Amino acid sequence: MFARIRDFWFWLQQSPWYIPAFLTVLALFIAVLILSLDFWIIQNEELLYPQILLSASPESARYILSSIASTMITVAGVVFSISVVAVSLASSQFGPKVLPNFMGDKSNQIVLGSFIATFLYCLLILREIPDDVSQALPTIAINTALLAVIINTGFLIYFIHHIHRSVQIDTIIAETAHETETVIKRLYFRNAESGISYNPDIFSWKEIRAKKDGYLQDYDEHSLVHIANKHELILEILPKPGQFILKGNILVKISKTTDEKTQRQITSQIITGTHRLPIKDILYDMDQFVQIATRSLPPVTNDFYTALICLDRLSAAINTIAQTPPPSPFFLDQNGAVRLVVKTFSFGEIVYNAFEPIIRISSDSPEVIIHLIHSLYKIAQQCSRNEYLLILKDIGTRCCQISSTMRADAKDSLSMSCDQLFTFIDSKVITDH
């Protein structure tokens, strides 16, 4: 159940409508509250409005409110149009993976929601403007609408500044880097279990197959452990987060035969969908870096500066992973017994997924390959695991293999960088032995 709530909350955050919807409902309550205050003041004749408040005739009040309402809905349409144009430009230039960042941009949602909420507020106040000039007007409500215009003017200025910054590649990469760091902390800073006794060969495994196609988005490990403990089972989820599952593929294995109801309970805690999510998929945001980097290199474009920024961010993420114990694939019950086994991405899978596509397309960009070698050297300096160092060395070897197509000066520079990397890794591995 927790996984579905977490999944729904993530979907809600990526939706462009939930903040505007909330602000619209809030405007309704504010209108009712302020009108109640106005009517209370009107009914108590000894109470007077402060002199600072603007007073107007019914005709002037209707004109002011209708003008504000029409202006707000017009500007809301302009804000929406600008947002769509920004999304289209970013998607075509940097790839479709940046779309969720723009769709879930809370600043854009707040600005759009503020204009729509002000529009609705003015319509509600217009209903309460009397035709008779002798009747009192809801003065506070009218002045609140004027205050909302001032606030929305500030929002519009901020929106113009924000939309200009949000389509800049540095901003997109920085936001993606922050999301990557958040996912790494969530997945890798869970205490690794040690000394676990687990032998899968002693069980007569039964298979539960997927009922539909889709990507593995999330699973509720706590509920699955509870179900497994209740029925004395061990569960093993075969796909890794983010992997595509075909209908009929094995989704999960259970250590013994169980009834259909229990199997439905198990599969209900494993979420699949039409697209990948970064909840447990550590490659999701890294793939966005890779997509931006490969689109910035020939033959697509020739902006190796963007590729260098992506390499820096990928290196920072991989450096964090290299210095952190890998997450345990085991989840235990309160008695310390293994109840759930999941698949995790190894360090090698992460590194190859991050750097291989960039290496393949960088044969005409020696600056990118040399920068990658320097990044590998920085990671190796912080890395303490021999198996990780050998993976970094293999990536460096693949970089050297494409040097045949480079110009002479670039080839010499790459050779010197590779020699420095290999010498350092070899000496560190020998020292550790």
Image: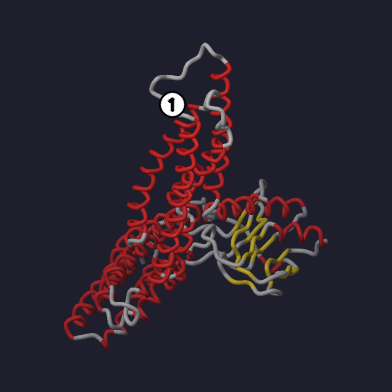
Q: Position of residue 353 (x, y in %)?
A: 44, 72
Q: Residue furthest left?
A: 409
**Quadrant in which the C terminus is drawn:** bottom left
Q: Which residue is mark 1?
A: 55
Q: Residue at x 41, y 40 (%)?
A: 149
Relative depth, front residue between 55 and 133 = 133
Tell me: 210 left or right of 391.
right
Q: Residue at x 20, y 80 (%)?
A: 410
Label 1 neighbour load within 10 Å: few <14, some 14-19, many 20+: some
Tell me: 116 left or right of 50.
right
Label 1 residue SS: loop
Q: Position of residue 274 (x, y in %)?
A: 60, 67
Q: Residue furthest top?
A: 46
> Would you identify the image quadrant in which residue 362 lies?
bottom left
> Would you identify the image quadrant in which residue 257 lies?
bottom right
Q: Residue at x 39, y 58 (%)?
A: 177
The chosen color scheme is secondary structure
Q: Amino acid at mark 1?
A: Ser
> Would you identify the image quadrant in which residue 212 lies?
bottom right
Relative depth, front residue between 10 and 228 = 10
Question: Total number of numbered labels?
Answer: 1
Q: Position of residue 3 (x, y in %)?
A: 63, 53
Q: Residue at x 54, y 28 (%)?
A: 34
